[in-house]
Image: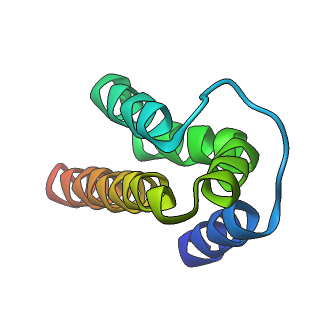
């Protein structure tokens, strides 16, 4: 199920374009870093990525080579959320 959600988020990021609040990939990457610092769970990170996927796609399309900052931030967020999810799973296994 998680792989499907990740795949859907990546597809949405690549395939969509729409308006948003960040004006460039550096700002979006900073917003990702802020969200990672504040997030309490993997679910929160994944939901935020889904909510901002159209914005990220627009920025990647507009920025050309600078789109790497957006893509890198998205991958970092997905990796971090996956690690948070694994940590939560391990805690639940060891607490039983």
Instruction: Classify 19 as above or below 66.
Output: above
Residue located 83% across and 53% down the image: 17
Pick the quarter of the image with the N terminus.
Answer: bottom right
Residue 86 vs residue 79, the one in the foreground:
79
Marker count (numbered)? 0
Residue located 55% across and 77% down the image: 3
Spot occupied by residue 36 in the image (x, y as percentages of width and height): 34, 35
**Left or right of 25 on screen, residue 7:** right
**Left or right of 70 on screen, residue 23:** right
Instruction: Classify 47 as above or below 8.
Output: above
Residue located 55% across and 37% down the image: 24
Write down the quadrant of residue 13 in the picture. Answer: bottom right
Instruction: Classify 9 as above or below 49.
Output: below
Residue located 85% across and 44% down the image: 18
Spot occupied by residue 96 in the image (x, y as percentages of width and height): 22, 54
Write down the quadrant of residue 57 in the picture. Answer: bottom right
| Colour treatment of the image | rainbow
**Left or right of 85 on screen, residue 49:** right
- Residue at the farthest left position: 94
Spot occupied by residue 67 in the image (x, y as percentages of width and height): 51, 58
Residue 17 vs residue 12, the one in the foreground:
17
Spot occupied by residue 47 in the image (x, y as percentages of width and height): 61, 42
Write down the quadrant of residue 64 in the picture. Answer: bottom right
Instruction: Classify 51 as above or below 71.
Output: above
């Amino acid at each position: 199920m998680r792989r499907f959600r990740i795949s859907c988020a990546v597809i949405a990021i690549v395939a969509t374009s729409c308006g948003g609040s960040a004006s460039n990939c550096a700002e979006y990457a900073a917003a990702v870093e802020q969200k990672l610092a504040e997030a309490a769970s993997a679910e929160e990170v994944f939901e935020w990525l889904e909510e901002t996927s159209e914005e990220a796609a627009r920025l990647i399309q507009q920025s050309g080579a600078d789109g790497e900052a957006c893509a890198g931030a998205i991958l970092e967020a997905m990796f971090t959320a996956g690690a948070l999810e694994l940590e939560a799973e391990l805690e639940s296994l060891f607490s039983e």
